[in-house]
């Protein structure tokens, strides 16, 4: 177990009322398991997570890709506000396999329901792995049955069973002290080397709390926190067919939170920090990534998003980040591309707090300043602040560099 | 001089009425020069091209980037229908240098006008090279004067002076036999390793013909041919700040073409083939490129373009092309991303004529077919045909693979 704190990005502060527990701990009333079902060549590949309380409420978010995996289609049709269990596999994404793939995703859901004595509609499913290959149904179903017999009150094996090319598990369990004096637990297990990984697509995240929440609250909090975390990252600008976030709240801790109360706000702050740190970890764990950039764009409401995406997804910006090169020209070019057809193009740009472009014109740096800038951009996390014309909008995107390992990983694998 | 024919892509046929002359030949009444002015560390870096006939008509097209180089701003304000000369430099793109950069671009134009006894408005200018550095004005102006003394009736030095990271000159001179029995010449010199090159941005193309054309005709032909060539390529999806195409028609061959005549159509076919071959050469010469892909998308009018771009710009598709991996899953994923929010997602995909996805479901290939597919995608040019829902639209994009050399080129250079 690493002794490094979970909250380690400069861009995410641990809220003062939040304490880190063992990363694979689970809130009260949750159990999980992870087993090796033979879908991958080796390692854990089937995970099962269950809330023991009938009163559990839930929320979910899925990829916006028009091409969705069979498990996404099946999960979307489940009772998303009252999920009790999640059945997940890694090693195969179950995409583009037609009716056979749909039948397998239904079998995945039904196997968990049978093993846990639940309605199928109370089971969410997710898959991640290779696209366009048959997911072996028998292995998956047997694996789920096997996992149901191995359920334990921690996420040790579960957090490993959902991984593909990740360097290691991404999980945390937090103890959240509420203004009312009570404490609740909030945990999450995630996987993902960015928006889409090399042979194995997808980001997945599973969130649990033993707080008692209204169904609308878990949905609202999940929506807001996903927008501020997994929606704000890019490894290669590629949107997966399988992205899914599931959040379950079971009230097993005996603390019910009133909607719009200070307690809810405090839990929301913890939830937000949890997902942002996990999202940044996905970027840092992007294929071959060595450095993480953050671009903050302020300006007209309708242009900040395309500008931030254009900068974060530019292979020229990403290779400059790899090279620790404060190459502002590539940032201006990418921003200008997103603003095609608009004028005037008058932007300010600061890198690590140093103004390098002012009102569209390059700032002549003092002697030594360039060297300082070069040192700054060699850090593990680098910040770019861009101001474009207009007002009212501000956004951010976290992005990885583009490395030789990315090219190797993605070109040497053969389906 | 290479003995390889100019028309060498499988995707561009040499029209039967077109004969290839020496690639650096020029049509009647055009002269050019290229000299070393010291803007680059070594090699030719200032080019000048002039039409000797006062009756010359012209057309131009420029980048859509909101951030444009000073020479683009100056050229746009010139008399674009009646240009007589072009003054070009490589090694420095003259971008984001504020008033100083604008003054330098004006000096570039004025120096050519003075040397050739023309109005400044009759001179087009273009620059390509590093962004955000001062372009040395004195060297540039002296270089233009020097070039004016070296003008010769060929494009040998000119075609070299415009290059940056290109592997070699991209130029051709064609003899076009018209239905009327006359012949005219059509030539072009281009540079570009894609939409934007590593340290040196931009594609540039200079077209000349000794045919007599109406100003509207040269503008119309240029617009159509650019849309079918330089608008249809992507190395890294990055739009330069300096892209420019200039076309000059001087009538010096004594053959005037009537608008909408068969002769004009025949010249247009030659012009179209010329620019398409040059555009494909830019992709093949993309940074580190080893293979060229062509994606053809048919379906609803409004979706074929974003789908084709999403496929062509996907780093996952590009690394699969590098790896000679017939990875259709990545093509489906990229197409689905472009269609986010739409449904149903039912697509057909053929790679090199082999159907691999039918109505959204992977086709089970016969034994041996997969091996055949793997051989096909190892060729220098690979074709992907994608059918998405809807009707009325069809488009194509030519794209390069993403290689280690791209990462090396773009990460190891430091501004």
Image: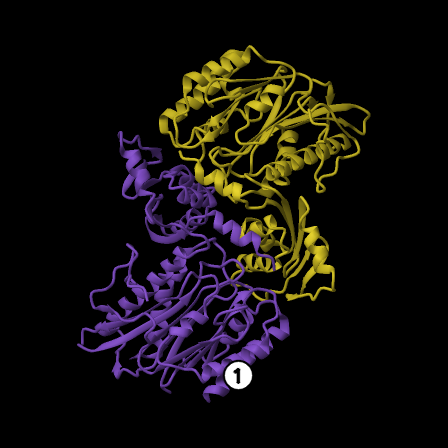
Chain colours: A purple, B yellow
Residue B283 coordinates in the image, percent (x, y): 60, 40
Front-most of residues A8 and A267: A8
Q: Please identify the residue farthest to the bottom as the structure is shown.
A: A117
Residue A282 coordinates in the image, percent (x, y): 40, 59
Left or right: where A357 falls relative to B104: left
Kindly identify which residue carries mark 1.
Answer: A110
Instruction: Kindly identify the residue that appears in the image at 54 percent across and 63 percent down.
Output: A66
Q: Measured along the vertical axis of the image, is residue B343 above or below residue B8?
A: below
Front-most of residues A34 and A71: A34
Disc 1 crowd rating (10 Å Cα; few below 14, some 14-19, many 20+) is many
Instruction: Kindly identify the residue that appears in the image at 43 percent across and 80 percent down.
Output: A85
Q: Measured along the vertical axis of the image, is residue B155 above or below residue B333?
A: above
Q: Quadrant of the N terminus of chain B?
A: top right
Q: Measured along the vertical axis of the image, is residue B113 above or below residue B179?
A: above
Residue A89 coordinates in the image, percent (x, y): 50, 72
Residue A364 coordinates in the image, percent (x, y): 30, 30
Residue B128 visible to the viewer: yes
Instruction: Kindly identify the residue that appears in the image at 28 percent across and 62 percent down.
Output: A5
Residue B213 visible to the viewer: no
The image quadrant that residue A323 belongs to is: top left
Counting labels gives 1
The image quadrant that residue B97 belongs to is: top left
């Amino acid at each position: 177990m690493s002794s490094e704190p979970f909250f380690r990005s400069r861009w995410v502060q641990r809220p003062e009322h939040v304490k880190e527990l063992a990363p694979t701990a689970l809130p009260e009333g949750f159990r999980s398991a992870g087993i090796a079902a033979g879908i991958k060549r080796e390692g854990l590949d089937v995970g099962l997570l269950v809330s023991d309380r009938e009163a559990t409420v839930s929320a979910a978010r899925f990829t916006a890709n028009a091409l969705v995996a069979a498990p996404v289609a099946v999960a979307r049709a489940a009772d998303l506000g009252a999920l009790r269990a999640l059945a997940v596999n890694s090693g195969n994404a179950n995409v583009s396999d037609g009716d056979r793939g749909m039948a397998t995703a239904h079998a995945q859901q039904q196997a968990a329901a049978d093993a846990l004595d639940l309605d199928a509609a109370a089971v969410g499913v997710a898959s991640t792995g290779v696209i366009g290959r048959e997911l072996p149904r028998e292995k998956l179903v047997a694996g789920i049955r096997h996992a149901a017999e191995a359920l334990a009150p921690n996420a040790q094996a579960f957090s490993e069973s959902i991984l593909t090319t990740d360097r290691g598990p991404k999980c945390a369990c937090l103890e959240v002290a509420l203004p009312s004096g009570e404490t609740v637990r909030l945990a999450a297990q995630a996987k993902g080397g960015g928006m889409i990984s090399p042979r194995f697509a997808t980001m997945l995240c599973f969130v649990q709390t033993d707080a008692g929440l209204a169904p609308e609250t878990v949905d609202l909090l999940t929506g807001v926190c996903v927008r501020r975390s997994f929606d704000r990252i890019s490894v290669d600008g590629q949107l997966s067919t399988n992205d899914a976030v599931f959040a379950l709240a079971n009230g097993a801790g005996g603390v019910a939170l009133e909607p719009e109360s200070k307690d809810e706000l405090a839990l929301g702050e913890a939830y937000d920090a949890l997902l942002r740190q996990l999202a940044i970890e996905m970027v840092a764990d992007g294929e071959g990534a060595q450095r993480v950039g953050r671009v903050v764009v302020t300006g007209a409401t309708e242009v900040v998003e395309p500008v931030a995406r254009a900068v974060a997804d530019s292979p020229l910006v990403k290779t400059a980040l790899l090279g620790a090169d404060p190459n502002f020209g590539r940032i201006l070019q990418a921003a200008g591309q997103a603003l095609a057809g608009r004028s005037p193009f008058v932007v300010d740009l600061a890198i690590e707090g140093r103004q390098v472009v002012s009102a569209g014109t390059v700032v002549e740096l003092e002697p030594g300043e360039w060297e300082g800038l070069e040192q700054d951009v060699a850090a593990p996390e680098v910040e770019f602040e861009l101001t474009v014309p207009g007002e009212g909008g501000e956004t951010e995107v976290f992005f990885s560099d583009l490395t030789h390992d990315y090219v190797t990983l993605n070109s040497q694998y053969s389906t």
